[in-house]
Amino acid sequence: MTKLRLGVNIDHVATLRNARGRLHPDLLQAAEIAMQAGADGITAHLREDRRHIQDADIVALAQHNALPLNLEMAATRSMLEVALANQPRAVCLVPEKRQELTTEGGLDVAAEKMHLASYIKVIGAAGIEVALFIDPDFAQVQAAKEIGALAVELHTGGYCNTQGATREDELRRLTKTAKHAAELGLECHAGHGLCLDTVAPVAAIREINELNIGHFLVGEAVFVGLSESVRIMRARMDAARDVSLEEIARRDSA
């Protein structure tokens, strides 16, 4: 099993900065702290209304941030131009509604095949890896594969925002969908709403290669600092992954 990567989303460092329209807190400093604490990549969502991340932030992160940059963006012409100009390591295409507080669900890839395929082709030709943010659904995974995506990111909001038996059902859905994605040759990522109380069961899914976490880490940083927030999350993820490896070894030897 490969190491589970942690992508730290720094959108809400920008939200805090923008509250005063100044330069503090600095996004490059946040990225450096995240890297030193165990992050494997930096994620930033450039929204069409620029509510947090700004165009200049993407330029700075692409040029001066030591970690790979994962640009989350809508499949629009203006966002395509930003991606091609800045050459992030990866792009994750996401749905976007102006009125939503945060991304509320995954792309309907099955219904938007032609539109999304055109973006995947152009972005991929530039040497940028393309992932699609989807709900954990077999049909969406299949559609992603058919139009040439290299990866899918499973929306974990349905799992994180429920309790009890419903949460267990959502976890099974994530597990089965991640396995299906791997069987099709897609790299599988996951994210949205993950926190210390919910991350371990998702981190233990061996087909998932990367978790992208932001709001909780920045919120927790108010109390413990960003370095400690990322460090604790990294440790929680790694511990869950180690347990998963032990379970696999035990089953194989039985």
Image: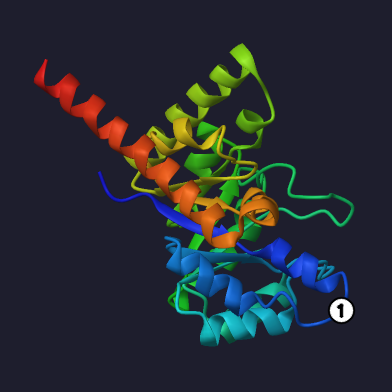
Residue at 64% across, 79% down: 58
Q: Residue furthest left?
A: 253
22 lies above or below 144? below
Residue at 83% across, 50% down: 101
Asked if one can make out residue 74 in the rendered structure from this viewpoint, the answer is: no
Could you say where residue 32 lies in the image, as x and y percent from the top left? Answer: 51, 74
In the depicted view, which residue is nearer to us: 138 or 211? 211
> What amino acid is at disc 1?
Gly
In the depicted view, which residue is nearer to us: 28 or 114? 28
Q: Residues within 10 Å of mark 1 (few under 14, many from 20)?
A: few
Could you say where residue 30 lies in the image, as x and y percent from the top left? Answer: 60, 71
For the N terminus, the image quarter is top left
Could you say where residue 176 lies in the image, as x and y percent from the top left? Answer: 43, 27
In the depicted view, which residue is nearer to us: 199 or 207? 199
55 lies above or below 237? below
Quarter of the view holding residue 252: top left
Residue at 72% across, 81% down: 55
* Residue position for label 1: 21
Q: Secondary structure at mark 1?
A: loop
Q: Is residue 40 left or right of residue 107?
A: left
